[in-house]
């Protein structure tokens, strides 16, 4: 079963943000291109600027869209938590010491970060889940760098259904 990281409204906001970034970069590119041509430079002399803008647009939009389309997957023997290109972790049911709702209000600001073996990966304060592990799991992030974590706090759409499904799978294992 797949569960989205974000609710539909949050995904729409991320899509709109990606569109805004593309639109802004196109406007900046267009303005720069016009200024360069007004000064009498040849188009081929501005090739580096073209590539820089295209590269920035692809990278920024790629990060936002990968995050908007990320999901968590419940498999027969493990959970796969995905956070777009920002990272992923595979957790076997036997590694889970405790899993449940996370309702604390005193948590770090929204985003993704590591702190003392805890990974925080959320963009809203609703539908948070906390997974405490018996040992450590390897969290792969940005271009397959590894970090050991023993606790993960993340958001998931349909949290109650997600937790119920995991508990069913844990009982089978």
Image (cartoon, helix red, strand yellow):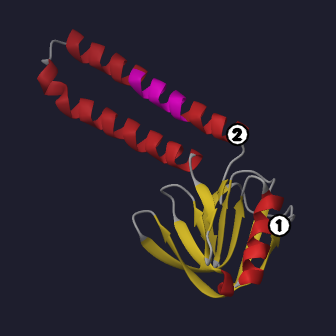
Residue at (80, 56) in percent of width and height: 127
Quadrant that contains the N terminus: bottom right
The disc label shown at residue 10, or none: none
Q: CA distance from mark 1 to mark 2?
A: 21 Å
Indicate the secondary structure of the residue bearing disc 2: helix
In the image, the segment drawn in magenta is: 18-26
Residue at (48, 47) in percent of width and height: 63
Depth check, mark 1 against mark 2: the one in front is: 2
Task: Classify 68 as above or below 32.
Answer: below
- Residue 169 percent across, percent down from the top left: 72, 76
- Residue 42 percent across, percent down from the top left: 12, 18
In this view, the residue in front, 2 or 38, is 2
In this view, the residue in front, 9 or 162, is 162
Residue ID for mark 2: 8
Task: Kindly indicate whether the residue at mark 2 contacts the one at mark 1 (C-beta within 8 angstroms).
Answer: no
Indicate the secondary structure of the residue bearing disc 1: loop
**Horizontal side, residue 50 vs residue 127: left or right:** left
Residue ID for mark 1: 102
Instruction: Give the mark, 1 or 2, whose residue is nearer the N terminus.
Output: 2
């Amino acid at each position: 079963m797949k569960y989205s990281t974000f609710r539909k409204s949050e995904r729409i906001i991320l899509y709109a943000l990606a569109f805004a970034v593309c639109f802004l970069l196109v406007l900046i590119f267009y303005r720069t291109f016009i200024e360069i041509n007004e000064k009498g430079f040849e188009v081929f002399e501005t090739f580096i600027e073209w590539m820089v803008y295209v590269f920035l647009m692809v990278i920024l939009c790629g990060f936002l869209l990968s995050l908007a389309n990320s999901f968590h997957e419940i498999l027969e023997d493990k959970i796969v938590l995905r956070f777009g290109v920002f990272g992923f972790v595979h957790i076997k049911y036997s590694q889970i010491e405790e899993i449940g709702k996370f309702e604390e209000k005193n948590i770090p600001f929204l985003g993704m970060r590591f702190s003392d073996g805890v990974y925080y990966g959320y963009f809203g304060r609703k539908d948070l889940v906390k997974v405490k592990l018996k040992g450590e799991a390897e969290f792969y992030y940005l271009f397959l760098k590894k970090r050991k974590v023993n606790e993960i706090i993340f958001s998931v759409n349909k949290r109650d259904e997600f937790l119920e499904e995991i508990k069913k799978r844990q009982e089978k294992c």
